[in-house]
Image (cartoon, helix red, strand yellow):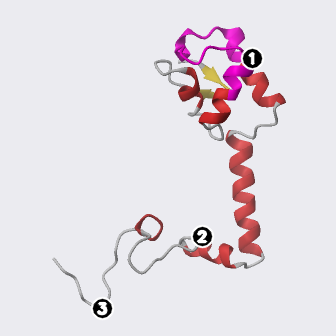
């Protein structure tokens, strides 16, 4: 398995799709990186040489693309800031509810978690 920026990417996938395994790199960014590094997008990741892997890593660092730890820290700092100023979005993050205006009376199971019984109305 090739390793870029401390992340092992799957060797059996094509390069742009393998780069998606790095947190913060989507398909469009991955294709741009391959184009800039002059790597064919139809190649598999395990066929990349060390020089090509280093070229991709260098482009990520030079291109100011925030990835992995830095990006995770920035996102969590933004959420903590919203909670500290007690904005509506911060309160929704703290309560574990959707922050972007979705309905919650019937949906939002991903954010709210498993249904909880209320007042002995357990349906078995």
Q: CA distance from mark 3 to mark 2?
A: 30 Å
Q: Earlier in the sequence, mark 3 or mark 2?
A: 2
Judging from the image, what secondary structure is the residue with disc 2 in? loop
Please give the label number shown on residue 100. 2
Residue that appears at 72% across and 78% down: 87
63 on left or right of 86:
right
Q: Is residue 10 above or below residue 82?
A: above
Q: Which residue is mark 1?
A: 55
Q: Are marks 1 and 2 in contact (CB under 8 Å)?
A: no
Tell me which label, 1 or 2, sits earlier in the chain.
1
Residue 37 is situated, as x and y percent measured from the top left of the image, at: 73, 17
Mark 2 surroundings: few (<14), some (14-19) or many (≥20) residues within 10 A: few
Would you say residue 108 sits in the magenta stretch?
no
For this view, does 75 lie left or right of residue 97?
Answer: right
Dot 1, how many residues are within 10 Å of its Cα: few (below 14), some (14-19), or many (20+)? some
The spot of residue 10 in percent (x, y) is 50, 24
Q: Which residue in the structure is indicated by mark 3? A: 119
Q: Looking at the image, is 8 positioned above or below residue 101?
A: above
What's the distance in space between the residues labelled 1 and 3, CA to CA? Answer: 61 Å
Q: How many marks?
A: 3
Residue 29 vs residue 66, the one in the foreground: 29
Residue 62's x, y, as percent?
Answer: 84, 29
Query: Mark 1 or 2, which is nearer the eye?
Result: 2
* Residue 92 marker: none
Q: Are marks 1 and 3 in contact (CB under 8 Å)?
A: no
**Secondary structure under the numbered disc 3 in the rendered image:** loop
**Span of residues in magenta:** 32-55
Q: Secondary structure at mark 1?
A: helix
Foreground label between 3 and 2: 2
- Name the front one of labels 1 and 3: 1
């Amino acid at each position: 398995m090739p390793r870029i920026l401390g992340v092992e990417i799957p060797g059996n996938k094509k390069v742009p799709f393998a780069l998606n395994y790095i947190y913060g790199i989507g398909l469009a960014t991955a294709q741009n990186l391959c184009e800039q590094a002059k790597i064919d997008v139809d190649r598999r990741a395990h066929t990349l040489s060390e020089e090509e892997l280093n070229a991709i890593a260098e482009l990520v660092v030079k291109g100011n693309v925030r990835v992995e730890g830095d990006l995770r820290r920035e996102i969590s700092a933004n959420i903590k800031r919203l909670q500290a100023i007690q904005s509506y979005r911060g309160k929704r993050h703290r309560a574990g509810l959707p922050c972007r205006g979705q309905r919650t009376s019937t949906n939002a199971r991903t954010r709210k978690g498993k249904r909880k019984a209320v007042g002995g109305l357990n349906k078995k």
